[in-house]
Amino acid sequence: MRLLRRLPLPIGVIALVVAGFAAPTSAAASDEALALVPPDVASVGLIRLDALRASPFAARLFSETDQLATDGDAAKFLAETGLRPKQDVDVVVVAGLASNRVHGPEDGLVIFEGRFDPSRLTAAMIARGAVRKSTPQGEYLVLSGRHGDGERAALAFVGTGIIVAGSPGSVTRALADREAGGSGFLRGEGLGREMSRVPSGASAWAIVDATRAPFAGPRRSREGDGDAADALVGAMKSVSLFVFHATSRGDAVDLSATGITADEETRDLLEDALKGVIAMWRLAIHEKAPDMVPILRKFEIETDREGVTIHGTLPGAFLREMAQKRQARRED
């Protein structure tokens, strides 16, 4: 998400579509977009927005783009380009190349798949200071805004259906990978070898190499949170891989998170810590959100020889209530 926040307008206009990144969708992943993911990424995630339009999360997610109509330059940009984020963006892939420093620089790609008008988008960006660049593999734009530590952001159109955004280096690399027939990610190279851990029907998912994007955990927990949260943070620091996925089931959402570790003692600690945190949450929300208590009771924690998984379901009624409360807070 830091990568998304760094992107300037007009990439930011498109990126606002995915401001509710945790919201799940349905449908299979896009091979065309994933084929541009570098195998050496430290993290990769995908969300399908095309199926989300009919989900309980739709109002929450797309309310972010509705606000663009009242944002002067953003609204003007949409009018000039004919871009309709609600209808035109179908898939978003975020791939991050992180340094070994916990708070170090982050590079990577944001890949948008949908229906775009490259000529109109290019003209609007050049009018806002973008500069056209050429490589043997194709053209890209260097934008007037900044990406990360003072570096300008870049964007390239891969045909009419794919937009690749990020640093100039990551964008030119994507163009070269496309010319070569793909990066190797889908062939199982690098983090791509972990794709088998994601169910084929998953609506949204993320894979994180924790050895390269280490889990820092929150700062010291607030008094009263107990030792369970601290134990969980401690155990997660020894996990080598995290896999998250969500799947829409009608208007409900199935959630799953797995921590992979080869150490049996760490798996035991992680399982115990998760159980403690769930129990702590149930006590904490007993009065504030009693409807959530029976939902948490149904979450299950399972351990096998590879790792520990927590999974459960958020009912549609609960999701709609959350969305309504969030909308009410916006209007207050």
Image: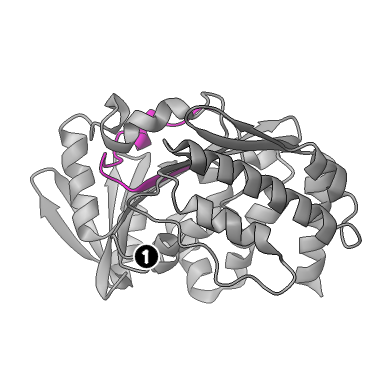
Quadrant of the rendering where the C terminus is positioned: bottom right
Q: Is residue 239 left or right of residue 320?
A: left
Q: Position of residue 218 (x, y in %)?
A: 55, 66
Residue 112 seen? no
Q: Residues within 10 Å of mark 1 (few under 14, many from 20)?
A: few
316 and 300: which is toward the camera: 300
Residue 86 seen? yes
At label 1, which amino acid type do we have?
Answer: Val
Q: Which residues are magenta?
A: 28-46
173 and 279: which is toward the camera: 279
Residue 157 vs 196, above or below: the answer is: below
| Residue at (79, 69) in percent of width and height | 329
- Based on the displayed image, in which of its 4 quarters is residue 53 positioned? top right
Q: Residue beneath label 1, please?
A: 102
281 and 88: which is toward the camera: 281
- Based on the displayed image, in which of its 4 quarters is residue 87 positioned? top right
Q: Is residue 40 magenta?
A: yes
| Residue at (82, 46) in percent of width and height | 318
Secondary structure of residue under mark 1:
loop
167 and 115: which is toward the camera: 167
Q: Position of residue 135 (x, y in %)?
A: 10, 50
Q: Is residue 259 magenta?
A: no
Among all residues in the image, which is located at the extreme front? Answer: 265
| Residue at (32, 72) in percent of width and height | 145
Q: Position of residue 4 (x, y in %)?
A: 43, 61
- Based on the displayed image, in which of its 4 quarters is residue 26 positioned? top right
